[in-house]
Image: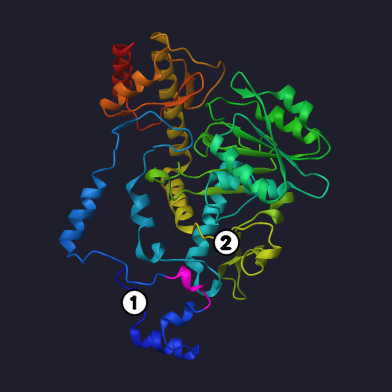
Amino acid sequence: MGSYVPNTPAQRQEMLKALGLGAMEDLYRDVPPEMLVGEDLRLPRGMGEWEVRRAVTALAEKNRIYPTVLRGAGAYRHFIPAVVKSIAGREELVTAYTPYQAEISQGILQSIFEYQTMICALTGMDVSNASVYDGATAAAESITMCKDRKRTKAYVSACANPQTIEVMRTYCFGSDTELIVVPEKDGRTDTEALRALLGEDAACFYLQQPNYYGNLEDAAAIGEMVHAAGAKYVMGVNPVACAVMATPGECGADVAVGEGQPLGLDLSFGGPYLGFMAATKAMFRKLPGRIVGQTHDKEGRVGYVLTLTAREQHIRREKASSNICSNQALCALTAAVYLTAMGPGGLRQAAALSMSKAHYLAGELEKLGMKRLHTGAFFHEFVTTCPDTEKVLKALDESGILGGLPVEGGILWCATEVVSREELDRAVSIIKGVL
């Protein structure tokens, strides 16, 4: 950050004087004394650049980076073109923050606008926002969008990611909303159970597509069922899968949410990730976060502004319907650059390769007696039975392969476009040796 200049000691003293304070400690005079550190922290001596680099490198070498990854469950290793990190890593973009003042934030506002436009194209929805922490948070925020005085119950498929369901529970607990989990049947949402559960007080139903087990749900039919009950239909989708399957808009969704990590963001041990949200025109006034609009000045020049952003989210939090006030603009920019670099054709190719390789892996595992636990169509994840899960995964681990995720009934496998056929054949050969 070569252009970043911190405040000097003299400038800090000048600011303290303007506040009527004599020292930095006076800023904390309202904090109870027992909460303050009474003595200096026992920090080690400072190190030179080479010493720091050696220490950090030693720490990084403790991380286990698998050459081959056959696990997904919500976070996926995809190919990221070099241009994505090159652009997103530019200093003027890394240091950009909340675009409150439109007149000096045109660049960051435009990047958010472009991101929103691409998310709308990907989901088939009318409007999108920015500034959502991750996919699970976006799913939880959608419940708040759908609630009203008469409709206070939220429903979620048991086939959704368990972590997403837990975040939804947390949000619902804080807002006195009842969350009802609709049971699964053969790896998909039990539609008969859903029909029986939906009542006049149903606010919304959340469906994950593809679901946690990788299976494709009958999303359009479920949407019709939800709307027939007078509830809103929320779909949580994999953005890469959206390139080859029916979009949430085509399935009748009122709100589309999801995890944007597959769009150019590294796995990074869990973050930072990116939650995306999109909605129909009828719902867009209830979208949390930031919405950037394009306009023109009096001379006809294109300009960008924050629009329909609830001020309560920033300064009157007690009146806010959402607590979103973070700016995920850097992650959103990364996703926008990735989508631009890939283009519609590249994204479809990534999705098609992921799907075909997963189906190839499923076929090879079936030859070993590891049959799919569920029937029907799936995207790039699937569950197989396994006679000795622990032994199989250990053997793969010892060979530098991160195997699938142990789940009830077997193993949840995943394949994306970055896994070669040779790697898949090697994994199958190792499993064959174990079994």
The residue labelled by disc 2 is 325
Report the front residue among 43 and 394.
43
The residue labelled by disc 1 is 5
Q: Earlier in the sequence, mark 1 or mark 2?
A: 1
Report the front residue among 173 and 124.
173
Q: How many marks?
A: 2
Q: What stretch is highlighted in magenta?
A: 30-36
Residue 157 location, quadrant: top right
Residue 289 location, quadrant: bottom right
| Image position, residue 370 (x, y; %) | 43, 12
Q: Please tell me which residue is depicted at 43% across the width and 48% down the height of the picture.
A: 271
Residue density around tag 1, few if under 14, some if 14–19, many if 20 or more, within 10 Å: few
- Seen in the picture, residue 169 relative to 381 is either above or below; the reply is below
Q: What element carries label 2?
A: loop
| Image position, residue 380 (x, y; %) | 47, 27
**Amino acid identity at mark 1:** Val
**Residue 279 seen:** no
- Seen in the picture, residue 427 relative to 302 is either above or below; the reply is above
**19 relative position to 12: left or right:** right
Q: Please tell me which residue is depicted at 64% across the width and 56% down the height of the picture.
A: 288
**245 relative position to 220: left or right:** left
**Residue 345 seen:** yes
- Seen in the picture, residue 139 relative to 189 is either above or below; the reply is below
